[in-house]
Image: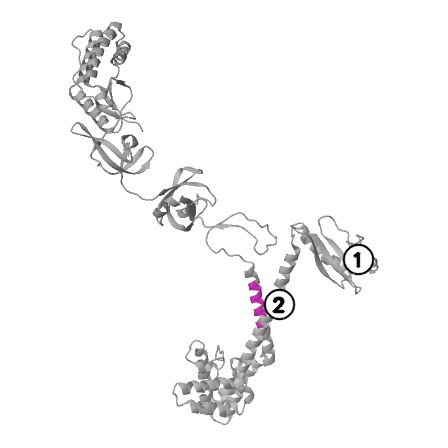
Amino acid sequence: MGTKQQLTAKGIAAMKAGEWANDASPHGAGQLQARKLANGQVAFYFRYTDAERRQIRLPLGSGLTLADARAQAGDLSRRYQTGERDLRAALEAEQRAVERQRRDEAAAEQAAEDALKTRKEATLSKLAAAYVEHLKAAGKPSWAEVERAIERNITKPFPDVAELPAADVTVEDVMPAFHRLTKEGKLREAEKLRSYLRAAYTAARRARNDAGMHAFTGLKVTHNPLADLEVSRPKEAAEKAAQAAKERKWALSEAQLDQLEATMLANQARVAAARSRVKDRTITAPFNGRVGLRNVSLGGLVNPGGVITTLDDLSVVKLDFAVPELFLSSLKPGLTVEAQSDAYPNATFKGRVDSVDTRVDPTTRAVVVRALIDNRDSRLRPGMFMTLRLVRSEGKALMLPETAIVPEDSKHFVFVVAAGKAQKREVTIGRRRPGEVEILKGVTDEDVVVTDGFSGNIALKTAEGTAKLYATWLRHTFRSSWLASLGYLLARGAFRRLRHRTDPRQYNGALFLGLNGICVKSHGGTDGEGFAHAIDVGVDLVIHGFNDKVKQEFSRFEGARNGDDSASTGPTTAPIGIEQPQ
């Protein structure tokens, strides 16, 4: 690598070809290096560590004095210590800016020279010729007289005036031609010449906004310098000449005017270049939105591609989510989306599906759907996690509890109560949601469907057990052991007779008698016919009023306990409940 001696003029002179020498510098400030070349010259470098921990050498040049090299290295060291870690890119950007400024200034100067050249070529004689051509094109017979008058009074006697730029001609320039005519007493000729020149300038000005006046192309006449030209009698002319002489005292020569105009155009070019550089440093947002955190400090260097801040348009947010390919046929733009966020647990954000991806992910077998959600209150932010509900279709549906459905093989049935009878009816089911099933076909919203039974019923399979349960209920209710014993005997006899009438084996089902009514329960091995038979038996029991009789007996027992033998309850109707397994 070379020695690390302190750089001095004497030490540099004693260096050998290819030898390196370093100048002492604080840690983290960069370092000035010198290298002796084969031709005897010394090349200076500034070494520093960039953001990626790489050692970078920036060439400062050869043939420099040690003082000049240290001055350049000092400037780079100060920039390096302020946070500029990529000095090479910064210097290259500055060099490009300088070159761009030079090109802009050169282009502006060239444009000024071209404009000046064009002005000099657009002479008064060309303006007169263009006016004559314009009169010819318009079919004016006066064009010949105009051509002869200008040639006789301007072009031939005053060729220098005829070659002046038409835009720079002044009254003083053409005044000798008019003086010559007035001295000769040709006042009428002078008035005609004045009229022709004024008309030529007026037509040239109008041609700047009239695409049909091709004869005046390139003249660029913006004013009429002869608008104030007057042709008067000799006395009046003398007075005006004296006034013009006073004003001419303060007039500039043509060369001075050209020099000032060139300077003005160059200054205008410099102003345009400066405005261009200022515009390059102005960042305009491409759309309306909200600016995020600033990533650049005041005075810091902004490199191309660097992130200064973020800009978000939060008026409408995009919500992307995956839907299984099973539902691909029902996905389309316009579907309603209801989304919720943990940040706003009580709020529901509604939107619409905007587009559906054209591809299905081969790994997840899902398609990405994009929805747009109105966010004018700016509550939602990019990157939030949301739970959503996609409404594929909206409408009315007939729903039944799942407990009302009786599956048999691949079919589904329900029991409809009609005229006191339970009818088994096949139905077609549709979509499901927790605890409910959609019915597409088989029943209407006016049908009465058996949905469920109720708990707390007593099986008639064991009459003694049922009678004991009634006795226990009597003991707790009336607090009387003898009333419980009497109830047990009566209930056991009644339940035995009922069991003979309704043997469960006759209908392959289970019949329940509860304190509040009769219930039929379907077991796993019960077929549909036996279950329907059980329902019919339960309905028959209610019709014959068995439950009412039992309740009347209990009412008498309660009246006897209270000392009122006439206490009884009137007949009541107990409901039929249906229970069946899931």
Based on the displayed image, in which of its 4 quarters is residue 281 positioned?
Answer: bottom right
The answer to which of 312 and 421 lies nearer the viewer is 421
Q: Is residue 340 visible?
A: yes
Q: Which residue is mark 2?
A: 102
x 27%, y 31%: residue = 404
| Image quadrant occupied by the C terminus | top left
Predominant secondary structure in magenta?
Answer: helix
Is disc 2 placed on a helix, strand or loop?
helix
Instruction: Write the start and end of the magenta stretch as one range.
Output: 265-276
What number is the disc on residue 19? 1
The answer to which of 272 and 302 lies nearer the viewer is 302
Based on the displayed image, in which of its 4 quarters is residue 475 positioned?
Answer: top left
Q: Residues within 10 Å of mark 2 (few under 14, many from 20)?
A: few
Q: Is residue 243 visible?
A: no
Looking at the rendered structure, the number of numbered marks drawn on it comes to 2
The answer to which of 16 and 229 lies nearer the viewer is 16
The kind of residue tagged 1 is Glu
Based on the displayed image, in which of its 4 quarters is residue 409 positioned?
Answer: top left
Tell me the CA gap for discs 2 and 1: 38 Å
**Rendering coords of residue 191 (x, y %):** 45, 88
Is residue 241 rendered magenta in the image? no
Is disc 1 placed on a helix, strand or loop?
loop
**Rendering coords of residue 537 (x, y %):** 19, 22
x 58%, y 71%: residue = 107
The kind of residue tagged 2 is Arg
**Rendering coords of residue 532 (x, y %):** 21, 27
x 20%, y 33%: residue = 447
**Rendering coords of residue 513 (x, y %):** 24, 18
Scheme of colours in the image: one colour
